Structure formats: C-alpha cells, structure tokens
Image: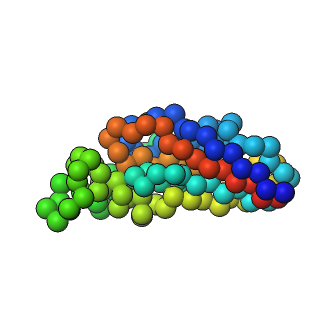
C-alpha cells in the first residue's frame, strides 16, 4: 500500500518551528507499521528532527545557522530576491528537504524527545507545501 497526500503548513516567520502536530493532523491514515516520508517542496526551507522539549533548542539552532551562513556576503551572486535568499538556499541544503520516519503502532515512530521541525530560512515566507508518502 502506498498513500500520498500534499498539504500546506501555515506560514511562519524565520526560525525553527515544531510542526509535528500540524503534520500528523494532515497525514493520510497510517498503517500499524511502515514508513512515512515527508518532502518539503521549497528550496529555501528544510525539515529536521530534533529535541521537542526545550524551546531554547529552537533559538540556538537559529543562531547557529545564522552564524554559519551569513546574509549579505560579498561573494553571493544570487541575491535578486533579497538578502535572505541565497543564505536560505544554503541553509536548506544543510538541513535537507526530506525525512523518512518509521511508522510504529499507527503513528510516526519518533523518540520521546523528538519532534519534526520546519526550518524556515526566509524572513517572510508563505505556507510551505509538504508531500507525505506512506508505505506500509
């Protein structure tokens, strides 16, 4: 069995946002066991799994990424869409655009302290499209 659903996450500001609950609400029915693949259809945002308990993690990740990939570097040639454009593409490459999560007991098999993050790298972004594919 393969099921697929595409949906849009609500718009968010730049940063790392826990979206586990929003994603689960939009998933097709999940089998008892299988795989869930999530793919974000954008080149300036990413998906990640990280700690879901302490909000300091979200702030620290944003600070780390902003320090690793700075805006307005003189060597950027792709800057037609603003100062955050090329850094957003680079950060998206670092996080990745897809996640594969086991399905355990009819739910995404995340660890106790794990959550799914939308890594939003643009200052002003619209809702982000997600393709969820279920195999089981």
Using residue 15 as the reference point, say whether residue 112 is left or right of it: right
- Image-quadrant location for residue 56: top left
13 or 79: nearer the eye? Answer: 79
Along the line of sight, the residue nearer the viewer: 20 or 43:
43
Q: Is residue 90 left or right of residue 72?
A: right
Q: Residue at x 35, y 61 (%)?
A: 90
Q: Residue furthest left?
A: 74
Residue 100 at x, y = what percent? 65, 61
Which residue is at 63% across, 44% downward? Answer: 6
> Is residue 31 among the parts visible in the rendering?
yes
Quarter of the image where one finds residue 19 = top right
Q: Is residue 109 visible?
A: no
Up/down of 69 relative to 127, above or below: below
The percent coordinates of residue 67 (x first, y second) are 27, 58
In the rendered image, the quadrant that contains the C terminus is bottom right
For image coordinates 42% across by 46% down, the residue present is: 120
Q: How is the image coloured?
A: rainbow
Q: Is residue 132 left or right of residue 60?
A: right
Q: Is residue 19 left or right of residue 25?
A: left
Residue 86 percent across, percent down from the top left: 29, 56
> Residue at 67% across / 38% down in the picture?
26
């Amino acid at each position: 069995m393969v099921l697929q659903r595409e949906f849009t996450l609500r718009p968010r500001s730049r940063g790392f946002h826990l979206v586990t609950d929003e994603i689960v609400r939009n998933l097709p029915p999940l089998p008892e066991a299988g795989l869930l693949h999530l793919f974000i259809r954008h080149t300036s945002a990413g998906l990640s799994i990280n700690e879901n308990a302490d909000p300091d993690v979200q702030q620290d990740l944003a600070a780390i990424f902003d320090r690793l990939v700075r805006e307005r570097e003189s060597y950027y040639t792709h800057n037609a869409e603003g100062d955050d454009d090329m850094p957003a593409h680079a950060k998206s490459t670092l996080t990745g655009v897809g996640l594969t999560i086991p399905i355990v007991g009819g739910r995404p098999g995340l660890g106790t302290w794990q959550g799914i993050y939308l890594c939003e790298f643009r200052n002003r972004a619209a809702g982000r499209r997600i393709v969820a594919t279920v195999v089981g």
